[in-house]
Amino acid sequence: MSVVARRYGPQAVILIMMLFLIVTYFFVMPKPVMDFESSVIKWGSVAAGFAMIVGAIDILRYHIVYLVRRTPGQWFYSLVLVVSLLITAAAGTIGIVTGVGTTYAPFAWLYNSIYVPAQATIYSILVFYIASASFRAFRVRNAPALLLLITGLIVMFGNTSLGYVIWPGFTPLSVWLNKNIVAAAFRPIIIGAGLGIIITGLRTILGRELYRRE
Amino acid sequence: MALSYWDIFGVWIAAAITVWLYSFAFKDNVLYKFSEHLFLGVAAGYSFTLGLDAISRTGITPIVTQGRVEYIVPIIFGLLFFGKYLGRYAWIARYGSMFVLGVGLSIAVRTAPEAFILKQVAASILPLYIPGDPIMSITHILMVLIIIGGILYFVFTFIPGGTEQRPTTTYKVYDILVKFGIYGMMVGFGALFARTVMTRVAFFIGRLRFLMGPEAIGATVVAVILVAIAIGYAYMQERKGGAQAAGAQTATSSS
Amino acid sequence: MSAAEKIYNILSTRQLLYVLLIIMVLIPLLHPFGIPISISSRVKAVYEYIEKLPDHPKVLIEIYYEPAAATELEPGLGAILRHLVKKHPKLVFVSLIATGPIMFESLKRYVPDVFKQLKYGEDYVYLGFLTGGEAACASLARGIKEFVPKDNYGNPTANMPIFKYADKAKDFDLVIIVSSGTDVFEWYVRQWYTPYHVPLLFVALSVIAPSIEPFVSAGQAIGMVVGQRGAAEYELLVGKPGSAMAAMDAQSFAHGLIITFIILGNIFYWIIRLQKKQAPAR
Amino acid sequence: MVFVAGKGVAFSLLLILFVLGYYYMKAAERGKRYPIRRIRAFEAIEEAVGRAVEMGRPIHFTFGYGNLYSSVAPQYVAGIAVLSYIARLAGKYGARLIATFGVPEAIPIVEEIVREGYRSAGRPELFKPEDNVRYLTNMQFAYASAVQATLIRERPGANIMVGPFYAESLIFAETGSWTGALQIAGTARETQIPFFVLACDYVFIGEEIFAAAALASGDPAIIATIRSQDIGKLIALALIVIGLILLPLGVNLGKLLFI
């Protein structure tokens, strides 16, 4: 019984969902079935909503341990995290319960003053990383690397007004590269990825991908 | 427009976090760690809110307002995630994972043949000879060679001459085609990498403009001075710790 | 350690590169040089289209982006608004994305000169964030006043003078869609262009451009202004070089710095490598 | 049952691939073996784990951003399979593994996989859930900021990244390189592959992550399914070549694929 519930049960869930969603996608179905199908698609994000709550609890538990143990060099930061998490979650919950949602003033303040600038900053910190990665990585060690460098330079020159001043041809050349060669280069990768996805799906429904070692 | 104290405080916090998060690129320091944990806390709280919102708006609302009882299914599977706190029965949380995965896998598998394979195949069928346009003809020939070579590169189990790669004629043809594929991919990678530099710089300009704006510039200056001190302190600590490097490693391992 | 190795090690210090990068971006932002850029035929076509619009054009503007994308999109929209305002337009702003209201306030701060010339309720209105995605888009086309009883600030729309001129899709001369995603472009093509043939203009991120290209090629949109580059070109045409133009200089400097480092890195790498090759012979 | 317009060929292709995959799996169970070309990045994993142990440093693994309810789910599954392999290696060599991730619905699976890895290597006592499995948050850049900090503070000897990566790919690859970790990465999100190729030591390009997932199982029946992926590629190749031949004759095969 236990093995059935632990191993074959989750497998059966995946198998049923996949069969249903594949059949409804490829074959013409009556409208009620299609309505049901469109709700099944949304099911994933509803169930994942619970996981997001569990995730927040896990983070909280993880940091409360540091707090309780007074781990040197960490407990203070854990305190910052726990407090900000609780305040944000409380503000968000009040917003949802009262129906004003994310426009609830304290929540909007946290979102605009902390979340938005922080995420924009981490996103844009890439400007530094892309610079140092370029320095390290565009090193001509062999023939393919030379090709990598040349295209990199053409496209960088083509992107900017500086390149235009040096040679007006950079821009059209970089457009040609991006439109044709880049498209061609990624096509086999996409085809391969598609095949990989299909076979991974097969392995999973046959119960061969996850939890096989029991 | 008069700014409230909260607005001003918000701008100061935003500017400080921006500067401090950037400081990581130079060196990890206490102010980064502070901002990081503040950000993580708010993000986790925000994620909690989004979760609640998804449950209420996408899950419960259709049941209540439209009588779509089928939405009880994801709610039950979602509740199983809490099973992980049940100790011996923690495995029931798997049902939640596998349920969500069932949706994702199905969406991916059912669209893959068309979007990933057939569309790409169709787009690869290009006219190799275009009268009066030698450049386009050559471009298309090159593209087709790169595509065929690329596909061959990804073949794992059918290799002419076997895995020992004997120099037969078929192997030579295969090898040349694969080279087209590899070199084509290199060009593609170089171009894509370089292309993103522009967007990254654009985003950075956006942050700099915010930091230099009249409302934030004061906060920016203060934050930069503070972070300079923090980084200096971090270097000093490192030099001190350098003598007892082995000890330092185990000390940080729990953080 | 040879001199080449020393220089190479200094170049490899990432902190040095980062400081230089900040300087290279800051200088042109504080003091734009105005390195000449070419104006593409595509942006010029958009400019000429707006130039040819009748006086008092009625324009719907969809604000569909989040804060991170503002740097790339706001300058383009700002330049177009500066152009439009010369014609005394009637502007209806709307958002089908939740971050819209924040972005609209940000836009008002970005082009205060434009909004100073317009009177709220008479010349422009902001409807706020509307839920419902494509369905909401379709409802807007059938009559804004009826579909949206209250604007973003809670004012009733029923008696707003602007809706005397600009209410239904057929009243509008142009729809400008400013977006960081791809879906919303398709919504307007299906709900505004296909049934009512209202001309559409796209303002998009540079990464999105390839996926909306087909609509422009097929003539479903009159054109597009893409990314900071497109915005800079439009600023030049309007004769008011602004943040996008300054950003182009910063872009050039940043790219130039990265290219220089790549080239120097290779030169010293090869010097060291050749030195090492000779070393055992000695 | 009638096909939805335009999806007939697609369904046939899916069916063919499923049948082939099943066939090769069964053939392998009967003892048939297929030679497979080397995937350097996969071979590098064991080496990387050994190296990290020698240096007395941990191994870091992460999946990238994404979720399990959208079309990137299979890449996450591939990441899980590779992680399971690394966990077994970690158990075998007595290494400390740190798996960071940002997808809450994967928490039960990831915890299970890592625990199981240590257990099957006979070292269940090495598994410490709060240290080995760290769910950080599912907001993309908060997750990224925590991962880059983890990389610098824990100084892993090996940094292995397999899954659906977005803009965070270069954040991880670059900060990972500062610590001198041996970096092995792979994703099938094609826009992020260049960053891994340029900044990491070994890379799984696209499909190779799925092949690696099969190899990671060590189960011949699963490895054999790679053969069906290859047949899929040969089918694609044949369609392209036939299409190219038919095109000058006035037949557009590209259109016929969507009936």
Image (cartoon, coloured by chain):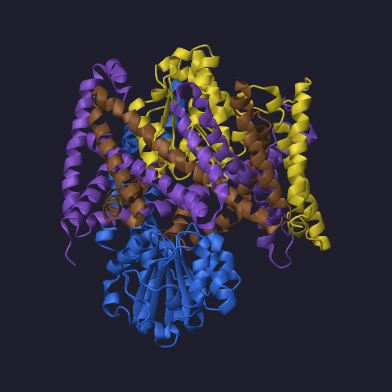
Chain colours: A brown, B purple, C blue, D yellow
Q: Position of residue C243 (x, y in %)?
A: 32, 64
Q: Quadrant of the C terminus of chain A?
A: top right
Q: Quadrant of residue C60?
A: bottom left
Q: Quadrant of residue C278?
A: top left
User: Which residue is more in the foreground, B47 or D23?
Assistant: B47
User: Which residue is more in the foreground, D226 or D121?
Assistant: D121
> As displayed, is residue C161 above or below residue B253?
below
Q: Position of residue B130 (x, y in %)?
A: 73, 64
Q: Which residue: 44% across, 18% down?
A: D127
Extreme residue toward the top, this view: D122
On the picture, is D202 further left or further right than C25?
right
Q: Which residue: 78% across, 22% down?
A: D32
Q: Quadrant of the N terminus of chain A?
A: top right
> As displayed, is residue D99 above or below residue A197?
above
Q: Is residue D67 visible?
A: no
- How many numbered marks, from 0 up? 0
Q: Position of residue C98 (x, y in %)?
A: 40, 59
Q: Position of residue C209 (x, y in %)?
A: 51, 61
